[in-house]
Image: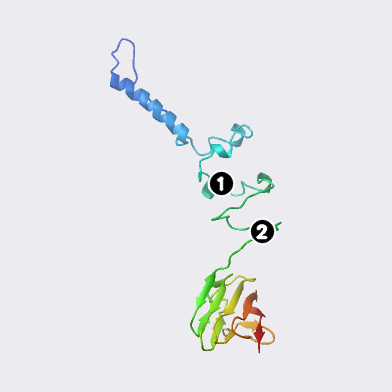
Amino acid sequence: MAVLTIPNTFVDATTIVAADHNANFTAVKDFVDGLASGANFDGGAINTEDLADSSVSTAKIQDDAVTAAKIAAGAVGTSEIASSVTLTTPNIGVATGTSLTCTGNVIGHIATNAQVGTTYTLVAADDGKVLEVSNASAITVTVPLNSSVAFTVGTQILVLQTGAGQITLAGAAGVTVNATPGLKLRAQYSSATLIKRATDTWVAVGDLSA
């Protein structure tokens, strides 16, 4: 804990100057104010054994006062989390598990990447989006090598043809895209989902034609 320093000391039979007297009181006040704001506590000065059970409630914690930088690694485990947790936007943090089980409805809104050219190569930002392509002429949508764009295995990208030009799905040299009966979207407003299955292996599932 920080040290309270009294700037002036007095001895018997000496005159006390008001300014010196006030300076002492000001030093005490500033120190106490620092305790109230937490500024005069050293890191680790208050341990869990110093706090009574349930003495620190959400009402006593300033909004945004507890950040990831202030929480020791491994300090919060599953036993410290209530059985019912409300996840709120804009950020619920990075998921560390392999699955999430929900009861009820999960509502999601898919972002769209609209393209109007006759060629397009997927980019990292397309992960999880609808790729909407519209052109009067034939269109080629290419899946890049993993060494160029390292999509995570399991990535899904929905490709939607909104124009008259037929979309052909293709892999860059070294990339395999499997599908049946072929890699062309069947007609205007047909769609197909590209799913990454391995490093440079994808499958297309949807309204396809040869």
Instruction: Name the mark on residue 84.
Output: none
Q: Residue at x 57, y 47 (%)?
A: 72
Query: According to the image, label 1 marks what residue?
Result: 71
Is 15 drawn above or below residue 55 in the view shown?
A: above
Quadrant of the frame with the C terminus: bottom right
In three-dimensional space, the C-alpha distance between marks 1 and 2, rounded to whole angstroms, equals 20 Å
Please state the horizontal and vertical placement of residue 157, each as a whole percent of the image: 60, 74
SS label for mark 2: loop
The scheme the figure's colours follow is: rainbow
Task: Decide: few, some or many residues near mark 2? Use Cα within 10 Å; few <14, some 14-19, many ≥20.
Answer: few
Taking the image as shown, residue 34 lies to the left or right of residue 83, namely left
The residue type indicated by label 2 comes to Gly
Please state the horizontal and vertical placement of residue 71, each as a whole percent of the image: 56, 46
Please state the horizontal and vertical placement of residue 14, each as a whole percent of the image: 29, 12
User: In front: 43, or 207?
Assistant: 207
Q: Residue at x 54, y 49 (%)?
A: 68
Residue 107 appears anywhere in the view: yes
Residue 3 appears anywhere in the view: no
The residue type indicated by label 1 comes to Ile
Residues at circles 1 and 2 in contact by the CB criterion of under 8 Å: no
Is 120 drawn above or below residue 60 in the view shown?
A: below
Q: Residue at x 64, y 78 (%)?
A: 202
Query: According to the image, label 2 marks what residue?
Result: 97
Is 193 drawn above or below residue 79 in the view shown?
A: below
Task: Decide: few, some or many residues near mark 1? Use Cα within 10 Å; few <14, some 14-19, many ≥20.
Answer: few
